[in-house]
Image (cartoon, helix red, strand yellow):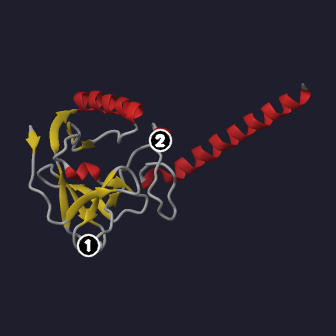
Amino acid sequence: MWRRGEPSEWIRVEQSGIHGSGVFAAKDIPAGTPIVEYLGEIIDKDEAERRGLEQMEVARETGDAAVYVFIINDDYDIDGNFEWNVARLINHSCDPNCESAIDEDDRIWVSALRDIKKGEELGFDYGFDLDHYLDHPCYCGKDGCVGYIVGRDYWDELLKKEKARLEKAKKRKAKRARKGKKR
């Protein structure tokens, strides 16, 4: 099943300072406004997993954006990896001005969390978990950016993981330096 929609009067696509193309407000957008629907092909979880892994591999090879699969419910996801799905170009932000929500018809809408000024880039929290956080660096540049595209619910755990990872790297570097002095 496919979901196609009409273009949104609220947005335009431009080059982004965050990553590739981005979505920008074409006019002032009041808080709470449904801005654009996330469109694509509705697929089952097995197909979503297959496509997600495939898209990740392409992203590793090309440096392009990675996965456009969005969870709808326990049974289905939507693959938004289609040029006509403008919402796929909304970048992640650690301080988002938008949020995504699923309505009673299992349609995904991106809405304004606050008033958005004309020309402002739209961003929402992708809500990624920690499984592959190192594969998803964040370039949003917002104050308090955690450096990775990880959902806010995971930030405390991410900071602990990063602290441990950096401490381990520091110890390895010190150990290599000591070995170099002994020679």
Residue 69 lies, in percent from the top left, at 27, 40
In this figure, what is the number of numbered marks? 2
Q: Which of 105/92 is in front?
A: 92
* Residue at the image point whose x is 50% and y is 65% from the top: 143
Residue 18 lies, in percent from the top left, at 41, 55
* Residue at the image point whose x is 15% and y is 49% from the top: 106
Label of residue 89 in the image: none
For the view shown, which residue lies furthest in the front direction?
15
Residue 137 is left or right of residue 69, and the answer is right
Label 1 crowd (10 A; few <14 / some 14-19 / many >=20): some
Kindly identify the amino acid type of the residue bearing the numbered disc 1.
Ala
**Quadrant (top left, top right, bottom left, bottom right) of the N terminus:** top left
Q: Secondary structure at mark 2?
A: helix
Q: Which of 55/124 is in front?
A: 55
For the view shown, which residue lies furthest in the right direction?
182
Residue 123 lies, in percent from the top left, at 34, 59
Residue 29 lies, in percent from the top left, at 23, 72
The earlier-in-sequence mark between 1 and 2 is 1
* Residue at the image point whose x is 37% and y is 62% from the top: 96
**Quadrant (top left, top right, bottom left, bottom right) of the C terminus:** top right
The quarter holding residue 28 reads bottom left
Considering only vertical position in the picture, is 38 above or below 24? above
Label of residue 133 in the image: 2
* Residue at the image point whose x is 34% and y is 65% from the top: 97
Label 2 crowd (10 A; few <14 / some 14-19 / many >=20): some
Q: Secondary structure at mark 1?
A: loop
**Are the two marked residues, 1 and 2, in contact with CB atoms closer than 8 angstroms?**
no
> Which residue was labeled with disc 1?
31
Kindly identify the amino acid type of the residue bearing the numbered disc 2.
Tyr
Q: CA distance from mark 1 to mark 2?
A: 30 Å
